Amino acid sequence: MFMFEEKRKRLVGLLKREGRIKSKSVEEAFLKIPRENFVPESVKHFAYADTPLEIGTGQTISAPHMVAIMCEALDIKENQKILEIGAGSGYHSAIVSQLVGKNGQVYTVERFSNLAEFAKNNLKKTKIENVIVKVGDGSLGLKQYSPYDRIYVTCAAPDIPQPLIDQLIDGGKLLIPVGRMFSKLISIEKEKGKIKERDLGGCSFVPLIGKYGF
């Protein structure tokens, strides 16, 4: 346990020096959430390598630097309601759960039921109670709890799914990788029903599957 804690501190230091972690809130969330709780036993010793790791079913847990980049770009505030598309192992939503605080709420959609169960168990083991995991087609969003202050997608889409734009609150932010082989991380702000897009640079993600996916 002590070994993992030291590795976690070193990783956070690295991400700060690289400019990936910029805010105190994101730094504290990374220090608090044990990434080793969110990876399979076989790769636990790589938990604090800044790299994606296999979590089964052809899916990966994102590299810590990408989680940091996305959290900083979303500018998440306490008490917000967040939608994540692609729960994976639950790590990214665990970090976000700290940013919204105990009165905030995170909903996450996962298309693989076995991964959804994995994420639920990992979140429970980490004593996180403000993340709800649902199984479904993430490209459709999660209309029943909309609108959301922030939406982010952890898989690459061919384009920006209209349901996600519709489910974003006015004044809200959406972050999504777009493109198959070489994706671009696109930041979207919704103002008075219109959207403004910004290209935050290249990234690599598994593809989004579903009605509005590949």
Image (cartoon, helix red, strand yellow):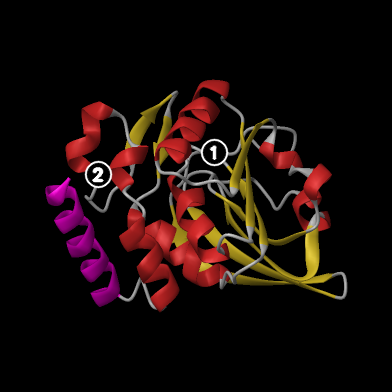
Q: Quadrant of residue 44 in the image?
A: top left
- Where residue 142 appears, as percent x and y from the top left, is 75, 43
Spot the residue most to the right.
192
Q: Please name whichever residue, 199 or 95, is drawn nearer the observer in this view of the structure.
A: 95
Q: Residue at 37% across / 31% down in the picture?
A: 55
Which numbered marker is on residue 207?
Answer: 1
| Nearer the observer, 190 or 114 | 114
Q: Residue at x 52, y 26 (%)?
A: 117
Query: Which quarter of the picture shows residue 10?
Result: bottom left
Quadrant of the snapshot with the N terminus: top left
Quadrant where the C terminus is found in the figure: top right
Can residue 89 be seen here? The reply is no
Task: Look at the numbered discs 1 and 2 and tell me whether their residues touch, using CB distance below 8 Å.
Answer: no
Per the rendered image, the range of residues in magenta is 1-18
Q: Going by the image, does 144 lie left or right of 5?
A: right
Residue that badge 2 annotates: 47
Classify mark 1: helix, strand or loop. loop
- The residue sitting at 19% across, 54% down in the picture is 5
Residue 5: give its label: none
